[in-house]
Amino acid sequence: MKKYLLWKLLLNIVPVIAVTILVVWLAIDNLAATYFMNLMENYSIEPHDSNRMFIEAVHRYLLWAAVVAMILALFLSYLMTKRVLRPLLQMTRISKELASGNFANRVEVVSRDEVGQLGAAFNQMANSLEQLEQLRKNMVTDVAHELRTPLTNLRGYLEGLSDAVVPPSIETFRMLESEILRLVNLVDDLQQLAKAESAQAFLQRSNLQIDTLVKQLLSLFELRLQAKKIETEVRIDPPELTLSADPDKLLQALRNLLENALRYTPEQGKITISAHRNNNMVNISIINTGAEIAAADLPYIFERFFRVDRSRSRDHGGAGIGLSIVKQLVEAHGGQVGADSRDGTTKIWLRFPA
């Protein structure tokens, strides 16, 4: 690319200079020479020898000027082209490194023109790829951990049963069942994530009353909320606020949010569900008290398998998929998701077109 593009840009200058010289040459031959002969005749001077000398001198200096202009133009164009091609060559080299799995290098951005903007966009893409690669590695590690723990337990107890070391009691079979259900839940989460990513093509929208949807949601979690003595508050303004959405997918998104809030809200804490209309958008948020999320982690909590505190998340039984499913479902409706965590509370908000 370097040689081809460089010489292509340089050779584009040659026809421009050649045409300019030709136009000047013809103008001198047809206009200046005629004017010079008329001038000589007016002063009674033999014009032929003087005209020939004049034309030869002009042509000679014009040729020298053309050579100097050509050299100067090629030199300056070469410097400018090299400056323009430098970030492009860097992008070529770094893109090969990205393809091989090296995400460390970035393009040096030295200008704010179109090439500089391209370099900045390339660096942003490289940053995103690096983050996705890190999340992919974390995902492999987390999935391996989530699978290894129940499988190890199952293997140990099954070996114990086969060797008659562990008695075949009801408690043992219940424990084996719980480990199998743990594996089933993980597979179900992965399947839900895959379905959420293609949800846009299967939306069945209807006009939903948010108040009714929230009541249905809270009834599903009533016993668990009471067990942790968590106070709930619902604020919907106006009470008859409606939203055009797929009821099953919206309920799934809200259920995942409430599940996440319930998981990390301490006993005797509080969960607030609010909804209101803002211009042409309907905002729904779930706020829970408890430990705050670090500002550096907030942009990534909706990425699949991302967990702020992995050991803490595993203790609570989460696989880091719930919020990613929420994001996919909300974006399938043309909406947005976001989070804020401060003053001992964490707020997850959803924004839908009205």
Image: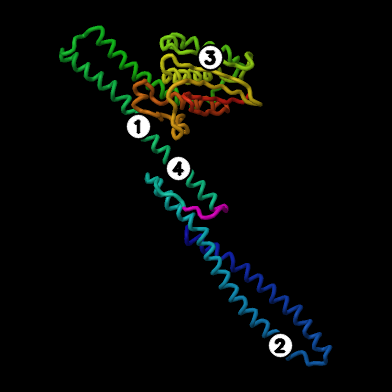
Secondary structure of residue under mark 2: helix
The residue that disc 1 covers is 140
Q: Earlier in the sequence, mark 3 or mark 2?
A: 2
Q: Nearer the viewer, mark 1 or mark 4?
A: 4
The residue that disc 3 covers is 233
Q: Where is residue 197 shown, x and y percent of the image? A: 48, 28
Q: 147 or 301: which is nearer to us?
A: 301
Q: Is residue 110 magenta?
A: yes
The residue that disc 4 covers is 127
**Type of the residue with mark 4:** Asn
CA–CA distance between discs 1 and 4? 20 Å
CA–CA distance between discs 1 and 3? 38 Å
Q: Earlier in the sequence, mark 3 or mark 4?
A: 4
Residue 189, quarter of the rendered image: top left
Q: Nearer the viewer, mark 3 or mark 2?
A: 3
Q: Residues within 10 Å of mark 1 (few under 14, many from 20)?
A: few
Q: Where is residue 10 shown, x and y percent of the image? A: 55, 65
* Rendered residue at 28%/25% (across/down): 148
Mark 2 and mark 4 in contact? Answer it, CB < 8 Å. Answer: no
**Left-right relation of 206 to 312:** right
Q: Where is residue 169 shown, x and y percent of the image? A: 22, 7
CA–CA distance between discs 3 and 2? 102 Å
**Left-right relation of 36 to 338:** right
Magenta highlight range: 108-115
**Type of the residue with mark 3:** Glu
Above or below 135: residue 62? below
Q: Earlier in the sequence, mark 2 or mark 1?
A: 2
Q: Is residue 191 magenta?
A: no
Secondary structure of residue under mark 3: strand
Mark 3 and mark 2 in contact? Answer it, CB < 8 Å. Answer: no
Q: Earlier in the sequence, mark 1 or mark 4?
A: 4
Q: Residues within 10 Å of mark 4 (few under 14, many from 20)?
A: some
